[in-house]
């Protein structure tokens, strides 16, 4: 079992879906990622919050064994806020408001210990900051994965391309993959992104599952057929947490381990969307994870 | 190997996609279905065309061994025409014109031999006609599958529900499944449709593959990751042809055979969309089918 570092955001989310709404609940890419990964391996988190950040949220992460020594609390600062809404098509979030607050001045600082973490996930933040994190690593991690979004693809393309050249895995949703590669066909888009640097491309497709492109071959995992999807916020980061968590836990990055990691990612995401915020994950146990992994296997298994 | 009967349409299609266009080419649900199924088993076709129907089209089907004795040529009639267009989102066809012609007066007539075919596919026609076909069967087929569309779900709901009660399998696309069940969640929609009669529900999801709901369990096949999708016309019927063709060829309808049939359906559809009309299928051989079946297996196989 190897340690896993995530650098990203911790947020207070206000979310409305056709099934209900919540106000200023725990969210953020690093939060979902670390909580999800904590079911698999030891996780270290680097992020910034304001001193308005409710202490019970940090406790929730600590209770799962997440190392929050790298959670910077900015005195007098306000925590990052995101306000979003979903219609019946839960694949697409509509952002109603973003208050960057402390995130605007966020400069990740890694001490000696954090800078030697063997597995690294650069969650969705400014690619210039992702590059700063890479520059601080004292030893090249065994695996570096990166997540990004349309905002950076459009506004920070050069910085994004620079950091992409140095990572092993990119996780990206399908519309963003097409945008980054400037190519409507997803297969060709995945190939084009791999040619930008990352040997492995993970395309997240919401309710249609996820696609792995690695070593010239594709692997596809469907989403778990759920009777009720409640709130898709954080599904992508929860997926990444399960994916990277399994790789770090096994301390292997070969093809078969990557495939199983894709399924663990999908398992974790399938739980996350069953309730608001991290609510479902806080009620989750390892037996449920194992059972749903088997259910995924049954869902796609061709031979009995 | 058991015989397979399809009752449906034979058409002349005019299609425009971002990649090109064709005029009055061979199309129709029964055409795509029978051509695709002919790679697996003996197929009988019942449909109607006008005397403007080019003889080389019937020859194409005969050359594949399709029994076209049930292809009625209406003297002085004109063949059914469909004009459609696709944008870059190839999942959705825009119908520009429909000329029913001989299809408006189509009354399928089954002779004694056809009426005893053990596998039956009721392609997408008026559910009242689908019911007429069922009434003519002299022996209950071992498996009856039915395809339908939004037009009948909206306009002929009662007739559709009547015929659904008598079939074993329904193939339907995802939007239509939601419409038929009046339920936005696809999992609950599939369960609701199964409760209407068909023990097996096959949901076609275009570029996202297909979903099988049978005996209370789900099975998911992704679409094959293609570098170029040219024209999706007929993909659903080609899928159904591979699916039913495999079941009839094996003369089995158990769970594992159904799963393999889902993959054969996906294999055939993945070829069909690579060119206009049946063009790619006419260049297809059994070795390519076997190779792509293996490729599908590799695409979803979790354990090496």
Image (cartoon, coloured by chain):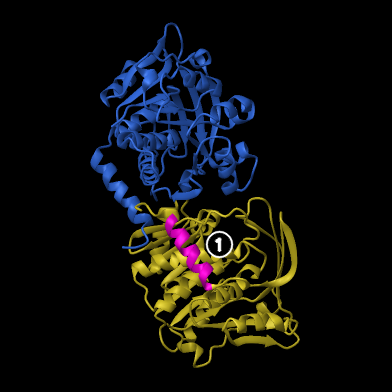
Chain colours: A yellow, B blue
Task: Sort mark 1 into few (<14), some (14-19) or many (20+) by Cα contacts within 10 Å.
Answer: many
Residue A112 part of the magenta-drawn span:
no
- In the image, what residue occupies the spot 50% across and 78% down? A131
Q: Is residue A282 left or right of residue B223?
A: right
Residue at (49% x, 72% y) in the render:
A146
**Is A35 drawn above or below residue B33 in the view shown?**
below
Magenta span contains residue A288: yes
Residue annotated with mark 1: A270
Which of B159 and A223 lies nearest the eye of the viewer? Answer: B159
To which quarter of the image does residue A11 belong? bottom right
Res B71 quadrant in image: top left
- Label 1 marks a residue whose chain is A
Instruction: Name the residue rendered at 43%, 39% in the picture.
Output: B19
Report the predominant secondary structure element of the magenta stretch: helix
Residue B299, how many percent across, how many down? Answer: 36, 55
Q: Is residue B109 left or right of residue A281?
A: left
The residue nearer to you, when weighing A131 against A11, is: A11
The foreground one among B167 and A266 is B167
Q: Determine which quarter of the picture holds residue A155.
A: bottom right
Farthest front residue? B139
Please indicate whether residue B203 sits to the left or right of residue A278 in the image.
left
Quarter of the image with the N terminus of chain A in it:
bottom left
Residue at the extreme top:
B76
Vertical position of residue B218 compared to residue A115: above or below: above
Residue A110, percent across and down?
A: 54, 88
Magenta-colored span: A286-298
């Amino acid at each position: 079992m190897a340690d896993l570092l995530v650098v990203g955001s911790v947020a207070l989310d206000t979310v409305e879906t056709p099934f209900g709404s919540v106000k200023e609940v725990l969210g953020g890419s690093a939060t979902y990622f670390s909580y999800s990964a904590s079911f698999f391996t030891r996780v270290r988190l680097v992020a910034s919050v304001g001193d308005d950040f409710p202490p019970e949220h940090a406790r929730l992460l600590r209770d799962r064994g997440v190392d929050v020594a790298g959670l910077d609390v900015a005195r007098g600062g306000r925590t990052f806020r995101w306000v979003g809404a979903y219609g019946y098509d839960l694949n697409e979030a509509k952002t109603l408001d973003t208050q960057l607050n402390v995130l605007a001045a966020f400069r990740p600082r890694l001490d000696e210990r954090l800078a030697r973490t063997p597995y690294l996930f650069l969650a969705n933040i400014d690619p210039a900051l992702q590059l700063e994190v890479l520059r601080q690593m004292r030893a090249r991690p065994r695996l570096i994965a990166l997540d990004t979004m349309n905002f950076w693809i459009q506004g920070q393309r050069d910085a994004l391309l620079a950091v992409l050249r140095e990572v092993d895995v990119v996780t990206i949703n399908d519309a963003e993959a097409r945008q980054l590669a400037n190519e409507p066909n997803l297969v060709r888009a995945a190939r084009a992104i791999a040619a930008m640097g990352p040997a492995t491309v993970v395309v997240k497709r919401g309710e249609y599952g996820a696609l792995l492109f690695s070593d010239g071959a594709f692997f596809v995992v469907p989403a778990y057929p759920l009777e009720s999807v409640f709130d898709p916020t954080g599904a992508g980061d929860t997926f990444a947490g399960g994916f990277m968590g399994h790789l770090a836990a096994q301390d292997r990055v070969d093809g078969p381990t990557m495939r199983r990691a894709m399924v663990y990612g999908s398992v974790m995401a399938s739980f996350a969307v069953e309730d608001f915020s991290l609510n479902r994950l806080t009620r989750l146990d390892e037996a449920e994870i194992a059972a749903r992994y088997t259910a995924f296997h049954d869902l796609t298994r061709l031979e009995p």
